[in-house]
Structure formats: C-alpha cells, structure tokens
Amino acid sequence: MRSVGYDPRARVLEIEFAGGAVYRYFDVPERLYAGLMTAESHGAWFSAHIRDAGFRFERLR
C-alpha cells in the first residue's frame, strides 16, 4: 500500500496500492480503519478484514 485515507463521517476508506491502483471502500467502520493502521502486516490485515469482508467498492484508477 502506498497511501490510505479514511473519512469517518462518510465511512469511506480509500487505498492507493503500490502499483498505482486506487480503490474506495464504502461503509467501513472506523474500528476497521484503526485496525488496518495499527496492523503488523497491513496487506494481510487488509485482505482478511476489508477485501474479503464483502464491502462495496469502486476502482478509481
């Protein structure tokens, strides 16, 4: 991951990956964002708790 942003009011998580792709995930609880930011392995935590959890998302680029 290159960068991560979170809007707590909208509950939107935006992630830019190392390859340049940017994804926006919707209705993500703030506790999951906090968990991602404090995880020992951001990639593994993202895969288990965000990507594979069924959140609605869109690819921005």
Image: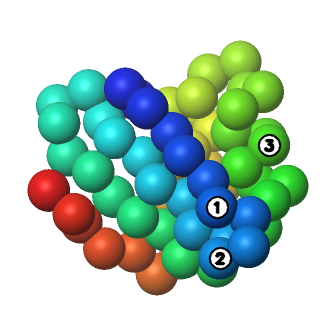
Q: Which residue is mark 2?
A: 10
Q: CA distance from mark 2 to mark 3?
A: 15 Å
Foreground mark, 2 or 3, reads 2
Image coords of residue 33 (percent x, y)? 71, 49
Left or right position of 51 against 9: left
Identify the image quadrant of residue 29: bottom right
Q: Give the image quarter of residue 46.
A: top right
Q: Residue at x 54, y 76 (%)?
A: 26
Tell me if mark 1 has few (under 14), some (14-19) or many (20+) residues whose alpha carbon lies within 10 angstroms of its own: few
Location of residue 39 with respect to 22 vertically, above or below: above
Q: Label 1: state its secondary structure.
A: strand
Mark linked to residue 7: 1
Instruction: Answer whether residue 49 is visible to the viewer in this image.
Output: yes
Along the viewing direction, whichever of 44 and 37 lies nearer the viewer: 37
- Point 58% across, 29% down: residue: 42
Of the residues shown, which amino acid type is indicated by label 1?
Asp
* Colour scheme: rainbow
Relative side of 32 to 59, left or right? right
Instruction: Say if mark 2 contacts mark 3, CB within 8 Å.
Output: no
Q: Position of residue 32 (x, y in %)?
A: 76, 54
Q: Please indicate, yes or no, whether residue 28 appears anywhere in the rendered image.
A: no
* Circle 1/circle 2 CB separation < 8 Å: yes
Where is the N terminus found, in terms of image quarters? top left
- The disc, 3 or 1, on the residue closer to the chain's N-terminal end is 1
Q: Give the SS element for disc 3.
A: helix
Task: Tell me if residue 48 comes above or below residue 40 in the rendering.
Answer: below
Q: Which residue is mark 3?
A: 34
Quadrant housing residue 55:
bottom right
